Image: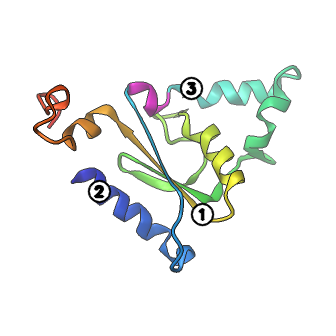
Amino acid sequence: MQLESSLLLSLSMIAPALAADPIPVYVLAGQSNMEGKARIEVMERQLLEEATAARYAHLRDGDEWLVREDVIIDFLDRRGPLTVGYGSPGRIGPELGFGRVVGDHHDEPVLIRECLLSELITLSPPTTPTLTPTPPYH
């Protein structure tokens, strides 16, 4: 129920841009690595190095991190346009690169719902023996 409510809330954020047309929704599911562990400060340092600056330049708009209003991230209690900071505090996750690619691919807005394995387990039918919710998944 929590995942479903979160998806509805996320969709309501971009509803004005949707009209009656469906939008692509991507679910990125994983364990703690889905939360994002890459330090933003490392990327900032790599932007200053000649050998790596070009690799990360697409993530910046001048001195600021790029914000994509056409790609909405929904993860835990955080929802908003694609930019850095949706991972652990001060970090990024796979949503940054993935969101850029799917945002470029689609003409319409895109919703990316990241979820941890524990969220998926709580949504599993109780008759599924390998995914029956057990503590600490409640």
- Structural crowding at the residue carrying mark 3, measured as other residues with C-alpha within 10 Å and reported as few (<14), some (14–19) or many (≥20): some
Above or below — where is 132 with respect to 67? Answer: above
Query: Are the residues flagged by discs 2 and 1 in contact, CB closer than 8 Å?
Result: no
Q: Quadrant of the N terminus?
A: bottom left
Type of amino acid at the residue the image marks with label 3? Ala
Q: Nearer the viewer, residue 58 or 137?
A: 137
What residue sits 78% from the left and 42% below the top?
Answer: 58
Of the two numbered discs 3 and 2 in the rendering, the one whose residue sits closer to the viewer: 2
Callout 3: SS: strand
Circle 1 sits on which residue? 109
What residue sits 46% from the left and 68% below the top?
Answer: 13
Q: Say which mark, if any, is on residue 34.
A: none
Region of the chain picked out in magenta, as a range: 32-36
Of the two numbered discs 1 and 3 in the rendering, the one whose residue sits closer to the viewer: 1
Q: Toward which corner of the image does residue 79 lie, by quadrant?
A: bottom left
Type of amino acid at the residue the image marks with label 1? Pro
**Residue 33 is one of the magenta-drawn residues:** yes
